[in-house]
Image (tube, grey):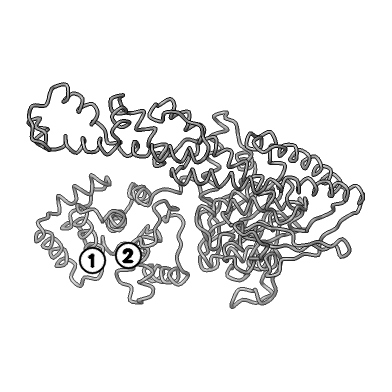
């Protein structure tokens, strides 16, 4: 798709092109014209959108497609999709076989009532296991093993790493006795003379000495102290165990405790089903399907497994009957409520969508947004943060029906979200099963970074003939252009961003310093930027000061006198220029000319300067305090990222600062 824009808002002239059927990204600083492009493509502009100072009749937008259907996600769409009263009258139900549905529903509710009779016993069993876990500080790693901080993990480690003599001593005398022995052998009398520090006897037998060397060679005394607590906790939980000072017996008991974790998950799954605010299968299609009646956790409750199987059978009938009745559920939500709630969990939003009520007569469905930790149906829609509302509205937008010819514009969807969730938003967008052309606009570089990095990784997997995930396949198939928008006095254009444009700031600077035709003052500017990134190091402070002094040279009335003052100042601090220049060359590969050989012309020469170099140079003579403050913020890296987009290619500064640079450039050329 190609778009030509003339005199629209802050764009005087621009030609913009993105590939069809791909997800393309356009990033750039605020005010560069991203939203103007969205307005141009949408066609939603009038005479008031003409560029300031131009005749509205000169405003023109042409696209390569005469019939362009556009769907846009922006601030207005967000407000419309996420209203304070989230209800919809877009619901259609076709009553196909009402009798079969009602009969199956009645059978299902009877089965649920049978399962609910076991609820108290399930809750009691869950509480008993919780008490065991709590009293033994039991926690599990991702692989299901015990963490080292848990009592069982600590005790197991102590047993496995102890000789039989130490275990026997602990079993007979206790952990405190072992600690006492360890304290004793740490005294210098024992280490140097083998004299008992407590009774001062120096006639300890060699056999006793050897024994003490074996049993005290450990720091894992706490693990042994936990064993009595573990024993009492296991006993209270009804777990069978033998001698816990025997490593094999302990392993057997630990295995049983680990199995209790799986039992808890099974009990929780069934309790989640029982605690659901409603058993309307339009909402909770998988709550009971996820429960396995053959699970051992249910076998200890006589008749529970049979009740679960009966309910599952009848729920299947209900779903089949309801499937014949159901039409569109909601224009946005449709039948994907579970998918929406999965997305909410993915973004760590602790709420779920639930149906409040529905009316066959009026064909309406109303919804609630309830907190996952609440057992009531209290509606929390007005309590969400702006970022949460934003992402929920985006989810709604992405799930609404799209025609294949629709061009989709997503304008700045990352407001109020951290970088991890921004990556999730990018994955959410790229992973949609669309064939549409998508344009993603953002002032934040994060989308460009993730698009390029994920494409490189997916491409690498493909080249290595490795199995590709569905996400990898979407990335390879759907990633289009990744572009940076530049707007210079209304003349807008794009630059293609590559993955190599992302690197550490120091590497960006070093790459610039390797440019062969840099002037002396350009070298100084970039070296100062380099040491700005590492000036916290003690060894760099004199180099930083030396480069800063040269950077300030344009303000000097007498340049020759100023050079001598700089060199004299170095001597006062016990430094000499040659050593500093050698150190700079060793770190960066740049050998600066001695200051004595530098002329005023070398300092004043601005030929070939890039924008960030011009900013650093002009900062020294800038008189406007606000402009100078912005310059200082860039030069001192106050807002720089450790891993950032190349600032030599892609600038991000105010139009006021650009105007200042443009004015100075024209003045110097004149």
Q: How many marks?
A: 2
Residue depicted at x 24% and y 29%: 215
Q: Position of residue 632 (x, y in %)?
A: 34, 67
Q: Nearer the viewer, residue 439 or 354?
A: 354
Mark 1 falls on what kind of element?
A: helix
Mark 2 falls on what kind of element?
A: helix
Residue depicted at x 76% and y 50%: 404
Residue depicted at x 21% and y 36%: 182
What is the crowding at mark 2: few (fewer than 14 residues within 10 Å), some, or many (at least 20)? many
**CA–CA distance in space, label 2 to label 1:** 10 Å
Residue 668 falls left or right of residue 142: left
Q: Nearer the viewer, residue 526 or 430?
A: 430
Q: Is residue 51 above or below residue 652?
A: below
Q: Can residue 405 be seen by looking at this rendering?
A: no
* Mark 2, residue position: 617
Q: Residue furthest top?
A: 207
Q: Is residue 196 above or below residue 478?
A: above
Q: Is residue 238 above or below residue 562?
A: above
Q: Nearer the viewer, residue 535 or 264?
A: 264
Q: Quadrant of residue 531?
A: bottom left
Q: Position of residue 627 (x, y in %)?
A: 38, 73
Of mark 2 and mark 1, the one earlier in the sequence is 1
Residue depicted at x 25% and y 56%: 536
Residue 668 falls left or right of residue 433: left
Quadrant containing the C terminus in the rendered view = bottom left
What is the crowding at mark 1: few (fewer than 14 residues within 10 Å), some, or many (at least 20)? many
* Mark 1, residue position: 553
Residue 569 falls left or right of residue 385: left
Residue 205 marker: none
Q: Is residue 313 above or below residue 629?
A: above
Q: Can residue 217 be seen by looking at this rendering?
A: yes
Q: Position of residue 302 (x, y in %)?
A: 69, 37
């Amino acid at each position: 798709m190609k778009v030509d824009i003339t005199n629209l808002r802050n764009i005087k002239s621009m030609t913009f092109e993105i590939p069809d059927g791909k997800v393309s990204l356009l990033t750039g600083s605020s005010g560069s014209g991203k939203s103007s492009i969205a307005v141009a493509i949408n066609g939603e502009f009038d005479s008031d959108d003409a560029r300031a100072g131009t005749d509205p009749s000169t405003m023109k937008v042409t696209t390569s497609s005469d019939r362009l259907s556009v769907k846009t996600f922006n601030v207005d769409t967000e407000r419309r999709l996420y209203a304070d009263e989230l209800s919809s009258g877009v619901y259609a139900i076709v009553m196909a076989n009402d009798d079969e549905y009602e009969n199956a529903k009645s059978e299902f509710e009877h089965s649920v009532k049978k399962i609910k009779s076991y609820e108290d016993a399930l809750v009691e069993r869950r509480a008993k296991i919780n008490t065991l876990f709590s009293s033994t500080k039991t926690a599990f790693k991702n692989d299901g093993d015990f963490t080292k901080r848990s009592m069982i993990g600590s005790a197991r480690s102590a047993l496995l790493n102890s000789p039989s003599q130490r275990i026997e001593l602990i079993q007979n005398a206790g952990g405190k006795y072992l600690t006492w022995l360890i304290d004793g052998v740490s005294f210098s009398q024992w280490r140097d003379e083998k004299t008992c520090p407590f009774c001062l006897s120096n006639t300890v037998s060699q056999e006793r000495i050897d024994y003490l060397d074996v049993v005290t060679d450990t720091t894992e005394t706490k693990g042994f102290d936990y064993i009595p607590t573990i024993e009492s906790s296991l006993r209270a939980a009804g777990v069978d165990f033998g001698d816990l000072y025997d490593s094999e017996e302990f392993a057997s008991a630990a295995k049983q405790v680990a199995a209790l974790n799986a039992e808890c998950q099974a009990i929780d799954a069934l309790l989640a089903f029982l605690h659901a605010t409603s058993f309307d299968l339009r909402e909770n299609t998988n709550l009971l399907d996820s429960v396995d009646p053959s699970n051992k956790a249910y076998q200890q409750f006589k008749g529970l497994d049979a009740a679960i199987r009966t309910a599952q059978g009848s729920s299947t009938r209900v779903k089949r009957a309801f499937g014949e009745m159901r039409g569109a559920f909601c224009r946005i939500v449709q039948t994907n409520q579970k998918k929406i709630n999965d997305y909410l969990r993915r973004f760590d939003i602790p709420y779920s969508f639930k149906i409040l009520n529905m009316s066959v007569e009026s064909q309406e469905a109303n919804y609630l947004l309830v907190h996952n930790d609440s057992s009531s149906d209290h509606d929390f829609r007005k309590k969400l943060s702006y970022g949460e509302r934003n992402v929920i509205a985006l989810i709604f937008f992405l799930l609404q029906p799209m025609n294949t010819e629709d061009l989709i514009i997503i304008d700045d969807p990352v407001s109020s979200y951290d970088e991890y969730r921004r990556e999730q938003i990018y994955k959410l967008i790229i992973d949609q099963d669309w064939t549409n052309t998508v344009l993603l606009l953002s002032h934040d570089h994060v989308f460009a970074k993730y698009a390029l990095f994920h494409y490189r990784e997916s491409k690498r997997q493909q080249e290595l003939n490795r199995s590709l995930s569905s996400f990898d396949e979407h990335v390879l198939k759907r990633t289009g252009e990744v572009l940076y928008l530049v707007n210079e006095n209304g003349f807008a254009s794009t630059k293609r961003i590559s993955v190599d444009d992302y690197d550490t700031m120091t590497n960006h600077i070093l790459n610039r310093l390797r440019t062969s035709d840099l002037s002396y003052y350009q070298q100084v500017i970039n070296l100062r930027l380099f040491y700005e990134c590492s000036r916290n190091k003690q060894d760099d402070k004199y180099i930083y000061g030396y480069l800063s002094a040269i950077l300030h040279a344009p303000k000097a009335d007498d340049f020759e006198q100023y050079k001598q003052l700089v060199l004299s100042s170095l001597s006062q601090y016990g430094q000499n220029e040659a050593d500093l220049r050698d150190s700079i060359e060793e770190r960066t590969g740049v050998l600066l000319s001695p200051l004595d050989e530098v002329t005023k012309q070398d300092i004043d020469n601005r030929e070939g300067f890039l924008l960030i170099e011009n900013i650093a140079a002009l900062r020294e003579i800038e008189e406007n305090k606000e402009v100078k403050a912005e310059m200082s913020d860039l030069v001192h890296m106050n807002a720089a990222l450790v891993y950032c987009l190349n600032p030599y290619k892609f600038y991000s500064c105010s139009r006021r600062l650009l105007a200042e640079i443009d004015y100075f450039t024209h003045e110097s050329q004149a």
